[in-house]
Amino acid sequence: MTLNFEGGEMGAGEIAALFRHAWPTTTRHLQVLEAAGLLRHERRGRERIYSIDKKKLELARDWLAWFFKKTG
């Protein structure tokens, strides 16, 4: 199992196994992240493989860091 996308992609089941909530909760979170453009998926047979859009994730990280500079 690849942990935290270190290999660049993860299967939906691998992602779900990292958390202690129900599968529908994981699915909803993945859909929100995908709608925000932070994740994308492709089907490989019956499995969905998710990958991170690193550029968009870096943009979100930088945007959040701005708030910490203002409050810290």
Image (cartoon, rainbow, N blue to C red):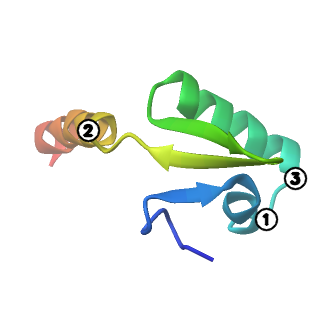
Type of amino acid at the residue the image marks with label 2: Lys
Number of residues whose C-alpha sits closer than 10 Å to that of mark 3, classed few (under 14), some (14–19) or many (20 or more) = few
Question: Could you tell whether 52 is left or right of 46 in the image?
Answer: left
Number of residues whose C-alpha sits closer than 10 Å to that of mark 1, classed few (under 14), some (14–19) or many (20 or more) = few
Type of amino acid at the residue the image marks with label 1: Arg
Question: Could you tell whether 35 is left or right of 23 in the image?
Answer: left
* Badge nearest the viewer, 3 or 2: 2
- Tag 2 residue: 55
- Tag 1 residue: 20
Question: Could you tell whether 19 is left or right of 21 in the image?
Answer: left
* Badge nearest the viewer, 1 or 2: 2
Q: Position of residue 20 (x, y in %)?
A: 79, 65
Q: Residue at x 43, y 59 (%)?
A: 8
For label 2, the SS is helix
In three-dimensional space, the C-alpha distance between marks 1 and 2, rounded to whole angstroms, equals 29 Å
Q: Position of residue 46 (x, y in %)?
A: 83, 47
For label 1, the SS is loop
Number of residues whose C-alpha sits closer than 10 Å to that of mark 2, classed few (under 14), some (14–19) or many (20 or more) = few
In three-dimensional space, the C-alpha distance between marks 3 and 1, rounded to whole angstroms, equals 7 Å
In three-dimensional space, the C-alpha distance between marks 3 and 2, rounded to whole angstroms, equals 30 Å
Q: Is residue 12 above or below residue 63?
A: below
For label 3, the SS is loop
Badge 3 vs badge 1, beta-carbon distance below 8 Å:
no
- Tag 3 residue: 22
Tally of numbered tags: 3
- Identify which residue, 71 or 53, lies in the foreground: 53
